[in-house]
Amino acid sequence: MRVAVTGTSGLLGGALVRELQAQGHEVLRLVRRRPAAHDEALWFPEVDTGSLRGVDAVVHLVGEPLVGKWSTHQREAIRESRVHGTRLLATALADMRDGPGVLLCASATGYYGDRGVALLTEESPAGVGFLPSVYEAAEKAAAPAEAAGLRVVQLRVGVLQSAEAGGLAILLPMFRRGMGIRAGAGTQWVSWIDLADAVSAVLHVLGGSLSGPVNVVAPNPVTNREYADTLASVLSRPRLLALPPGLVRRFFGAGLADEVLLASTRVVPARLLTSGFAFEHPTLRETLQNLLLRVT
């Protein structure tokens, strides 16, 4: 295939590009600056549709990072990067006569919001709050491409596990020093996925016939307490600390704390499983053992 990808400098985008190329596919990197190489094309603020002729599929992974204390400006950037960016790309693809036939857009399990112990599948409705409203609007922004006949998939990605980047990489130094922590009571559910499994899931969706929402998460979500205890156990270190909700909000900001770190989202990959996808690392312990074995 010839696949165009946005967000190639991100954790998932970079890993996806490497695997696509390893499998012999051709990758066109869609960038938001002047293209500097033969395999790059501009997509923002205006889509270079000429470069997309002959491309089989587009994987759209761009989104403003959620880190920080979510000022008014950052909230606008979080929403605009996901909603406007998706609408811009979907509209451009819809207007092409000889363009890609598939559009995969990154959403997130944040679509479901804080839902306690409820088991969530792709059939579950959007939650309440800032992030659910952003992801719901971003998913709807792809409607022009769907109306034009493209196969559109919304990838509701969970918390990516990688020892090189992302949340796990931030936690590792603290846990290795015996300063492992849980957030709040630790009863909130975390829907996670090994980075390699996430890439395999995207490739599975690319080569299949699924459309609509697809939960890109491992089949075994865990509580925040279980996550912290498992990481500490794999590292053979104690997990002694608990950060009260008030301190979580003070250190990370109320938005990130309440809608990400303290929110409980128990998601399962129902559609991936029924479509025949097999996870290489379905449990957290073996995932962490595998990841840490490669960096120690």
Image (cartoon, rainbow, N blue to C red):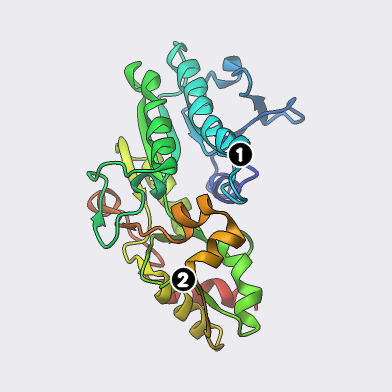
Pick the front one: 203 or 246: 246
In which quadrant is the C terminus drawn? bottom right
The spot of residue 191 in percent (x, y) is: 39, 60
The spot of residue 16 in percent (x, y) is: 54, 47
Pick the front one: 4 or 259: 259
* Residue type indicated by callout 2: Thr
The spot of residue 107 in percent (x, y) is: 43, 41
Pick the front one: 130 or 165: 130
Q: Which residue is mark 2?
A: 287
* Residue type indicated by callout 1: Gln
Pick the front one: 76 or 150: 76
How many numbered marks appear? 2
Q: Residue at x 59, y 61 (%)?
A: 250
Residue reaching furthest right? 36
Residue 58 visible (yes or no)? yes
Q: Is residue 252 rendered to the left or right of residue 153?
A: right
**Residue 189 sits above or below residue 150 on the image:** below
Q: Secondary structure at mark 1?
A: helix
**Residue 271 sits above or below residue 279 on the image:** above
Circle 1: is it few (<14), some (14-19), or many (20+) Cα within 10 Å? Answer: some
Q: Secondary structure at mark 2?
A: helix
Distance of label 2 from label 1 (alpha carbons): 33 Å
Residue 222's image quarter?
A: bottom left
Q: Residue at x 38, y 47 (%)?
A: 204
Circle nearer the viewer, 2 or 1: 1
Q: Is residue 117 rendered to the left or right of residue 288?
A: left
Circle 2: is it few (<14), some (14-19), or many (20+) Cα within 10 Å? Answer: many
The tag earlier along the polypeptide, 2 or 1, is 1
Q: Is residue 179 rendered to the left or right of residue 141?
A: right
Residue 5's image quarter?
A: top right
Q: Which residue is mark 1?
A: 74
